Structure formats: structure tokens, C-alpha cells
Image: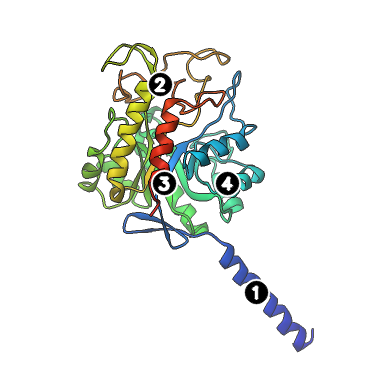
Amino acid sequence: MSKRLIIIVLALISIASCTTVVDSQVVKIYKQQLVLNDSPYFIKGICYHPVPKGSTQRSFNNLTADLALMVEAGINTIRVYEPIDDVTVLDEIEKSGIKVIMGFGYNQNGNFDILSGSFLNYIKTYKNHKAILFWELGNEYNYHPEWFNNDIKNWYISLNKAVDSIHKIDTNHPVATAHGELPEKLALTICSSIDIWGINVYRWDNPESLFSEWNSISTKPIYLSEAGADSYMTISKNNFKQGENQEAQAVATKNILQAIINSKDKSMGVALFSFTDGWWKAGEIDIQNSGGWAPNSSGVPYDGTPNEEYWGIVDIDRNKKKAYNVVKQIYTETKTK
């Protein structure tokens, strides 16, 4: 190879490298706040697990319509509970201007899970995709020590090792976990590598006390990985009638989101639970059932009961509930900076 050709090849390599750097997305943490490509980023999020009628499996067949509703509502982030292994789905999400908090489970039969280590294959494949905001490991596993030989310490050790493994292959995205309520000292001590603590919080209609409590135990950044209310009242309470009750959900959603926005400098934001109703959770999969149960759920407004199939801000046919309009008003009026 001639000297001139070598110079040309090296120049092309250099240009390609520069292009990669320019096109890459960098998500960092600065003073407990999220920064996306040098701009502050506040999570105005929604939890998204779209399971259609008559199914128990997630489907993105309605993605285009869902994204349109999210954009209209001012949602900038979706939180998913399992990886999206479809680049066309991620491309469409990214083109809509929405980012993804990508979640991984511990034991998913080797399907991009932590137990098998296959989650790292996913991260290697998709770490440069612009839809990714950050990675998240587990969802309130602290309520399930039975999954870890009845010793939750086993989960925390696995979690911290998984975070370290991610840090070695991806320096452009932080790593979070979603913990049920505030973590205890054991979790904070063992999981020292966690970049962001997601906290699933159901404290009636005001989670504001969480922030001062968190600051007393940790200097790490947090976001509310779940918060919200369902649209069914098991009993009549707080002047809300028993039965399907969108007004109760709307009032609680407004109070919850306003409390978070009022403490905007104390967290990275929130992923409201959830986008659409899930008919697969509490009974027959082709009809909507009241009832259902979730750990540590007595704080669900306003009846203390998590009616698991009624949490959407839209119903399963994508009709807007009253809570949708609340989310739209608050999110569109809240600046990300």
C-alpha cells in the first residue's frame, strides 16, 4: 500500500470516528440531575407495557397511535419492564422524540436476563441507539426474597455485579434499579455502584415526604419509577363513589404530579403508572376485572386497593380518561430544564 493511500485510509477512519462521536448520545449525572447531551433532562414519563385484549403478552401493534397520544400529553420518556428487541420499534420511539428507560429482569429464562448474563448481549447491541435514556435492573425485587433463596442479600449482590458489568461496556448511559419504597441500609451498602435509584412510591396522593427522607440516607440521585392511582374505587371513600371512578384517579394524579413537580430540584422526575389498562392482570384476559393485589399497596389512593386492571391514563381501546388530561396539562406546562 502506497504512503498516499495509507494517509487517505487513516483520514477516512478519523472522519468515521468523529462522526460516531458526534452522532452518539451521552447521558450523564450532574449534581443529582440527569443531563442528555449537555442539556438538563427532567423525566416526564409513563410506564408502558401494552398488552392487548385476550393476551398476556406485550405487543407494539398499536405503537404509532400510542406514541401520538404520548407526544400530545407531553410525555418524554417511557419505562418498560423488559427489553425491546426490535430496532424498528426503537427507531419509531426515537423519531417521536421520546426516550426509553430499558428494564431487565433477573430470571427470564435466558432472554436478556441478569441470571444468565444475556442482558449484556442486549446492551452491546443497542447501547448506541438514541432511544435509550438509561438501563434499569429489576423492579421492586425487595418485596420478593423468595426469588433469591429467601435472602434478599443475594439479589443485591447480583445487582451490584450486573451494574459493574454494564459500566465496563457502556460509559454513555447510567444504570438504575427500581426499588419498592426507600431502600434500607443493606441495599444501599451492597449496591454502591448504582447510579440512579428508582423508587416505586405509593403514598396516597402526596409523595413529597420521600425527598427529605431520601436525602437523609443517600446522596445518589433518584426518580420515581412508579407513582400514580387507578380508576376504580373498591369502596366509597373521600367523597368518591364505589366502582369505576375516573374522577378519583384524576384528582390523585394531579396531586401526585404537582408534588413531584414542586420538588423538581430533588429528583430526576417520574414514570407515572401507567399508560394503558392491563386486562391480563386480575382475571379473565378478554374482560376487565376489578381486584388484584400488589405488595405494599395500601397507600394507593383513595381506597388502599390496587385494582390492577384500571391503572391506565387511557383505557385498553385508547380512549382518554380524565387523568390523561391532567397529565397533559402538567407535563406540557413543565419545562425539562
Looking at the picture, tell me which residue is in the foreground, 285 or 237.
Answer: 237
Q: Secondary structure at mark 4?
A: loop
How far apart, in angstroms, are the residues tagged by discs 4 and 3?
15 Å
Label annotation for residue 96: 4
The amino acid type found where label 4 is placed reads: Ser
Query: Which residue is disc 2 drawn over?
Result: 246
Q: Secondary structure at mark 3?
A: strand
Looking at the picture, tell me which residue is in the foreground, 147 or 69.
Answer: 69
Instruction: Please state which of the two labelled residues, at mark 1 or mark 2, is closer to the viewer.
Output: 2
Query: Which residue is disc 3 drawn over?
Result: 43
Residue at image point 31% right, 16% down: 240
Q: Secondary structure at mark 2?
A: helix
Query: In the image, is residue 56 above or below residue 193?
Result: above
The amino acid type found where label 2 is placed reads: Gln
Relative to 215, 73 lies left or right: right
Query: Which residue is disc 1 drawn over?
Result: 15
Marks 2/3 in contact by CB < 8 Å: the verdict is no
How far apart, in angstroms, are the residues tagged by discs 1 and 3?
34 Å
Q: Which class describes the residues within 10 Å of circle 2: few (<14), some (14-19), or many (20+)?
A: many
Query: In the image, is residue 244 above or below residue 117?
Result: above
